[in-house]
């Protein structure tokens, strides 16, 4: 009699393991297909076109160290003329913009009453003088007492003082020029009534003119009275005015820690006008040679100042490989490759690069140290060699190693003494 053997169904654990393996296999297949599609897509994508930039070569130039500031022009002598007495205007003896001389009568108020009173007082003073002389004769003959003579003498002095006081009152009705200069705009006409203290006209002596400006206290050691000063004004583009440093304030401003400076500038043709602002430059020290670039070539970052130097791609790749090899050698504490072999490789690379006319250009980011600016230019003291070709515009779209195409048809401003351009 045959015995029937019953098969046991697989356990639940085995079925769960099989399902997990099946799911993992399915996920792996999906990931592989996706990766394959991405790789094919990336392989089919075209590389980004080279960025178009402009470049300039770093070159040494002579720099004259200077101190720069913005100043205000001030007349050598200037005043807003007024009278300290009210009255009716009878004469105006000048026109707007006239050149006047010291002591010249500019305006006259009505003074007929004051003049009449002055003549009356002069007559009384003359009578007192005659009376004193008669009293002196009578005193000699002992016809009057000494007290009567003293009274006559005091009366004469009182009358003379009254005359002098009235002369001052009459003079107050006349406006005279206190110094030589040019009159401003006058709007007062005969018949107008002037109040006391009302400004009648401004008078300015504008040859020479003074320039007031301020500089930080750290520059005091470089300043001397008699130094040459150069001025430029936006009202006269391209024109320079020469002057002399005439005074240095003996006091430093407590709030700004700046010192006030005064310069004197000749103005024979009356070109400069008080109240104008001017750019002031003072040459200090000897000329120095600096590696110079346009200011637009320098990129300012929180971690430092950088420029993009133009390199051939083969040269850039070799430099990157050498840097990586040197870093690996330093990490392993082993000496770098034989310098002689490296020199041979470098020479071979140069020959190959020279023969390969189609070697593309790339931009290499380089840290630099700057010293100062001059117009549109900036000086480089460290990090760059002479004749290095540097990107001057288009850096926003660059990173180290990015392909570039040079187009120098339009160049950024690179003038040591730029002037405003009108469009």
Image (cartoon, rainbow, N blue to C red):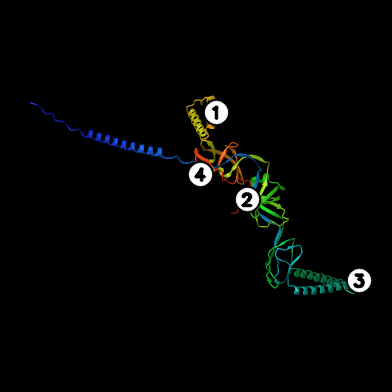
Vertical side of 87 occupied by 331: above or below: above
User: How many angstroms separate mark 4 from mark 1 (CA)?
Assistant: 34 Å
> Which of 134 and 261 lies nearest the eye of the viewer?
261
Q: Position of residue 90 (x, y in %)?
A: 73, 72
Disc sitting over residue 419 in the figure: 2
Q: Where's the C terminus, which quadrant? A: bottom right
Q: Can residue 158 be seen?
A: yes
**In the displayed structure image, the side of residue 294 where residue 74 appears, left or right:** right
> Which of 209 and 361 lies nearest the eye of the viewer?
361
Disc sitting over residue 396 in the figure: 4
Q: Can residue 246 be seen?
A: no
Q: Position of residue 177 (x, y in %)?
A: 74, 63
Cβ atoms at labels 4 and 1 below 8 Å apart? no
First reached walking from the N terminus: tag 4 or tag 1: 1
For disc 3, the marked residue is 140
First reached walking from the N terminus: tag 2 or tag 1: 1
Closer to the camera: disc 3 or disc 4? Answer: 4
First reached walking from the N terminus: tag 2 or tag 4: 4
Dot 3, how many residues are within 10 Å of its Cα: few (below 14), some (14-19), or many (20+)?
few
Residue appearing at x 54%, y 28% in the figure: 347
Q: What secondary structure is marked by label 3?
A: helix
First reached walking from the N terminus: tag 3 or tag 4: 3
Q: What secondary structure is marked by label 4?
A: helix
Q: Position of residue 223 (x, y in %)?
A: 68, 46
Q: What secondary structure is marked by label 1?
A: helix
> Which of 308 and 275 lies nearest the eye of the viewer?
308
Dot 4, how many residues are within 10 Å of its Cα: few (below 14), some (14-19), or many (20+)?
few
User: How many angstroms separate mark 1 from mark 3 (CA)?
Assistant: 128 Å
User: How many angstroms separate mark 3 from mark 4 (CA)?
Assistant: 110 Å
For disc 1, the marked residue is 347
Residue appearing at x 54%, y 38% in the figure: 310
Vertical side of 201 occupied by 217: above or below: above
């Amino acid at each position: 009699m045959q015995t029937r053997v019953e098969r046991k169904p697989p356990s639940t654990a085995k079925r769960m393991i099989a399902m997990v393996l099946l799911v993992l296999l399915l996920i792996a297949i999906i990931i592989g297909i996706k990766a394959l599609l991405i790789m094919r897509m990336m392989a089919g994508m075209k590389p980004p076109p080279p960025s178009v930039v402009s470049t300039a070569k770093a070159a040494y130039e002579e720099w004259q160290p200077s101190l720069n500031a913005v100043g205000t022009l001030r007349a050598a002598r200037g005043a807003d003329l007024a009278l300290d007495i009210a009255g009716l205007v009878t004469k105006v003896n000048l026109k707007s913009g006239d050149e006047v001389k010291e002591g010249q009568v500019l305006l006259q108020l009505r003074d007929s009453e004051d003049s009449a009173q002055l003549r009356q007082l002069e007559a009384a003073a003359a009578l007192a003088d005659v009376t004193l002389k008669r009293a002196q004769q009578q005193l000699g003959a002992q016809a009057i007492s000494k007290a009567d003579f003293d009274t006559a003498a005091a009366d004469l002095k009182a009358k003379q003082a009254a005359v002098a006081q009235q002369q001052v009152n009459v003079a107050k009705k006349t406006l005279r020029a206190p110094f030589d200069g040019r009159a401003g705009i006058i709007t007062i006409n005969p018949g107008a009534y002037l109040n006391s203290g009302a400004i009648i006209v401004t008078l300015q002596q504008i040859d020479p003119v003074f320039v007031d400006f301020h500089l930080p206290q750290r520059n005091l050691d470089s300043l001397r009275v008699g130094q040459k000063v150069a001025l430029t004004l936006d009202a006269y583009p391209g024109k320079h005015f020469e002057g002399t440093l005439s005074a240095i304030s003996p006091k430093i401003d407590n709030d700004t820690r700046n010192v006030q400076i005064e310069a004197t500038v000749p103005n024979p043709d009356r070109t400069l006008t008080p109240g104008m602002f001017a750019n002031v430059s003072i040459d200090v020290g000897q000329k120095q040679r600096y590696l110079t670039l346009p200011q637009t070539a320098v990129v300012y970052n929180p971690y430092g100042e950088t420029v993009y130097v133009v390199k051939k791609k083969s040269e850039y790749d070799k430099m990157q490989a050498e840097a990586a090899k040197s870093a690996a050698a330093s990490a392993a504490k082993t000496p770098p490759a034989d310098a002689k072999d490296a020199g041979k490789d470098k020479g071979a690379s140069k020959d190959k690069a020279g023969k390969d006319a189609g070697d593309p250009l790339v931009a290499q980011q380089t840290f630099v140290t700057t010293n100062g600016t001059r117009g549109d230019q900036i000086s480089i003291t460290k990090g760059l060699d002479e004749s290095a070709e540097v990107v001057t515009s288009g850096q926003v779209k660059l990173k180290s190693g990015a392909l570039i195409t040079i187009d120098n048809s339009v160049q950024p401003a690179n003038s040591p003494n730029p002037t405003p351009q009108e469009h």
